[in-house]
Image: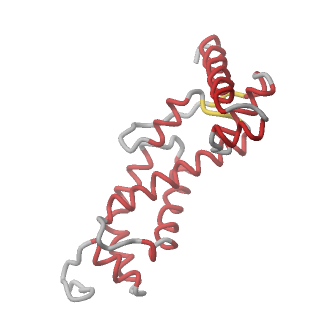
Amino acid sequence: MKETLGSSPDPSDEELMLLYQTGQERAFAILYQRYSSRVYGFLRKRLSDQNSIEDVFQAVFVKLHRSREQFNTSFTFAPWLFTIARTVALDWHKKQVVETKYVPRSEVELEALESPTSGTAELGLIDLSVLPRTQKSAVEMRYMKDMSFDDIARRLDTTPDNVRQLVSRGLKQLRSLFAKAGG
């Protein structure tokens, strides 16, 4: 016998979120059942190793749980959930980059992870120690600390345009070194 939840025998995702917001844990179980395989597939296309996929997958549903009060039931549930999944995956990637003190080979690879339509992002990493000190600092602040060009300019006591140039030159040098190494 199928258990019903609320007044509808087959509540919408949005109705389930409303019920979950009011403390009905069964609503979360139904949402998990409906979306777990889709979220897992979404992450599998964006992350390369199994442990990372599983860690991020779990973090997505933890964040959904913690953010449930922020969900507005006048919006569609699925895009909200996949925005959470993309954000958690991107945050996880940035944390990995910071922990290893490396940066993605190119901006294109980082954008591939951010893009909801991208395929598998094989995120190769290059050591930043090959860059001059100011370029290294600018690239680290831009990609590892997610700082704006204005904030970086204040930190480096220069102009935002100069920071853009430092980051651009640093990335160009990293691409060149990567190409020479056969990547």
Horizontal side, residue 40 vs residue 150: left or right: left
Q: Nearer the viewer, residue 154 or 69?
A: 154
Q: Nearer the viewer, residue 134 or 121?
A: 134
- Residue 154 occupies quadrant: top right
- In the image, residue 149 above or below residue 136: below
Horizontal side, residue 42 vs residue 50: left or right: left
- The residue furthest right is 133
Image location (x, y in percent) of residue 14:
29, 73
Image location (x, y in percent) of residue 48:
51, 40
- Residue 176 occupies quadrant: top right
Q: Nearer the viewer, residue 155 or 137?
A: 155
- The residue furthest front is 159
- In the image, residue 106 above or below residue 56: above
Residue at 51% across, 32% down:
109
Horizontal side, residue 38 vs residue 167: left or right: left
Residue at 42% across, 87% down:
23
- The residue furthest top is 180
- In the image, residue 26 above or below residue 148: below
Residue at 34% across, 71% down:
31
Image location (x, y in percent) of residue 21:
41, 81
Q: Nearer the viewer, residue 27 or 76?
A: 76
Q: Quadrant of the C terminus?
A: top right
The colour scheme is secondary structure
- In the image, residue 84 above or below residue 97: below
Q: Count the labels in the image.
A: 0
- Residue 129 occupies quadrant: top right
Q: Quadrant of the N terminus?
A: bottom left
Image location (x, y in percent) of residue 4:
24, 86
